[in-house]
């Protein structure tokens, strides 16, 4: 069965939405294959890119360069330790949509935002 681009993109979105965690392109590809979907890794990345351009998918990069994807509506931000690489989620989004629109020039429509905080976690902090 040959799937259309739109169908494939919906499939990717479904998998991202059904996953509790963010997924890398490879993990996403592996899940689709496990469910019997025939789709190449390069195609997965191509569709992820166009989903990002449509504002449907957000992407963040780990310290090791790996990209993780999540659906746009999941507005979660992370604190990442530069020492051990562990990352934890913030309980709330610190980017207020209202203050965002104050600073956004007229005519620009924000689709999604990313925010990432890097620092030293409690475990890695030298005892003082
Ligand atoms: Zn740490
Ligand atoms: Zn946010």
Image: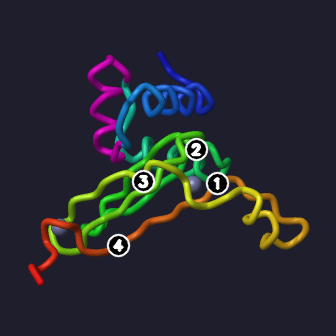
Start-end of magenta stretch: 23-37
Q: Position of residue 90 (x, y in %)?
A: 42, 53
What secondary structure characterizes most of the magenta part?
helix
Q: Quadrant of the C terminus?
A: bottom left
Between the C-alphas of marks 2 and 4, the distance is 22 Å
Q: Residue at x 55, y 33 (%)?
A: 9
Between disc 1 and disc 4, whose residue precedes? 1
Above or below residue 13? Residue 126 is: below
Residue under label 1: 112
Q: Residues within 10 Å of mark 3 (few under 14, many from 20)?
A: some
Q: Is residue 97 left or right of residue 123?
A: right
Q: Earlier in the sequence, mark 3 or mark 4?
A: 3
Q: Pointer 4: what residue?
A: 118
Residue 17 against residue 61 in the figure, above or below: above
Q: Position of residue 116 (x, y in %)?
A: 44, 66
Numbered mark located on residue 90 in the image: 3
Q: Residue furthest front?
A: 128
Q: Nearer the N terminus, badge 1 or badge 2?
A: 2
């Amino acid at each position: 069965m040959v799937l259309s681009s739109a169908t494939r993109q919906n499939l990717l979105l479904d998998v991202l939405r059904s996953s509790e965690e963010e997924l890398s392109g490879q993990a996403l590809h592996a899940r689709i294959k496990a469910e019997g979907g025939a789709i190449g890794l390069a195609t997965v990345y191509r569709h992820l890119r166009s989903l990002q351009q449509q504002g449907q998918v957000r992407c963040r990069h780990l310290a090791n360069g790996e990209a993780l994807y999540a659906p746009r509506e999941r507005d979660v931000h992370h604190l990442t330790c530069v020492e051990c690489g562990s990352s934890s989620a913030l309980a709330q989004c610190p980017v207020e949509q209202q203050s965002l629109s104050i600073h956004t020039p007229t005519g620009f429509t924000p689709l999604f935002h990313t925010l990432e905080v890097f620092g030293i976690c409690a475990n890695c902090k030298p005892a003082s």
